[in-house]
Amino acid sequence: AAAPLDAWNAVRADRQTAGRGRFQRQWISDDGGLWLSAVVPTDSLGEATKLLPLLAGLAVCRAAAQVGLTQLRMRWPNDVMIGDHKLAGILIDQPRPGVAVVGIGLNVTNHPEKIEPALAAHVARLADFLAHPPSPQDIALRLLQELRKVVAEVGSEGATQAVKRITLLWGKVRDVSLDLDGVTVNGRFLGVDDHGGLRLETRSHKH
């Protein structure tokens, strides 16, 4: 629904009947969550357009921090986590030149585990950590403001400072297993590069 809209318009759904994640996986989008698609202009981003999943994650973390959430971290390339539990997921589409649609699914007071019991040990909600969680509409407005700020920062400062801020959101030094088309690479997370790529140091000290 957002694809034909002009830049800086957005669509929010109360629920989605065909929500999807990466690789066309199903995304449970039940009542009480934030299901948002925002149209973002990309001309000012240039090559940093590749960073949009991470830039949107930065905006999610900032918006969640405003309502009192702490201990947020990011998981490459498009998840926002609390510990080992997933709070939000991000999906980018580029329906036409000059814009991207940033899709954000954020658990607020919804119960995805009631629809898919296997999710019970893997999801987090704002309501799990806040006595008075914001409404999906409130967090949507905060998130859109932060997304616009992040895009403006990259347009004026370039990608380097944003990458530093994103890297800080990985939390403690951690070991990572990366699946590269069936080949698993294990290493220690070093951050992300200016194109959004994951940087690892392997056991043989290769980067």
Image (tube, rainbow, N blue to C red):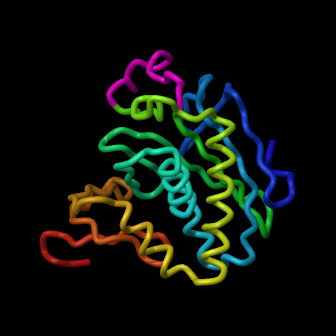
Query: Is residue 179 positioned above or below 18 on the image?
Result: below
The location of residue 123, given as percent across then percent down, is: 40, 33
Q: Left of 16 or right of it: where is 180?
A: left
- In the rendered image, the residue lying farthest to the top is 114
Query: Is residue 41 positioned above or below 95 on the image?
Result: below
How many discs mark residues in the rendered view? 0
Foreground of the two, 137 or 41: 137
Q: Left of 104 or right of it: where is 14?
A: right
Quadrant of the image for the N terminus? top right
Q: Which residues are magenta?
A: 108-121
The image quarter containing residue 96 is bottom right
The image quarter containing residue 99 is bottom right
The location of residue 193, given as percent across then percent down, is: 42, 76
Query: Is residue 130 positioned above or below 39 on the image?
Result: above
Quadrant of the image for the C terminus? bottom left
The location of residue 5, given as percent across then percent down, is: 86, 53
Answer whether residue 120 is magenta in the image: yes
The image quarter containing residue 154 is bottom right
Tell me the residue at 39%/46% (across/down): 81
Tell me the residue at 38%/48% (across/down): 70
Query: Is residue 24 positioned above or below 165 on the image?
Result: above
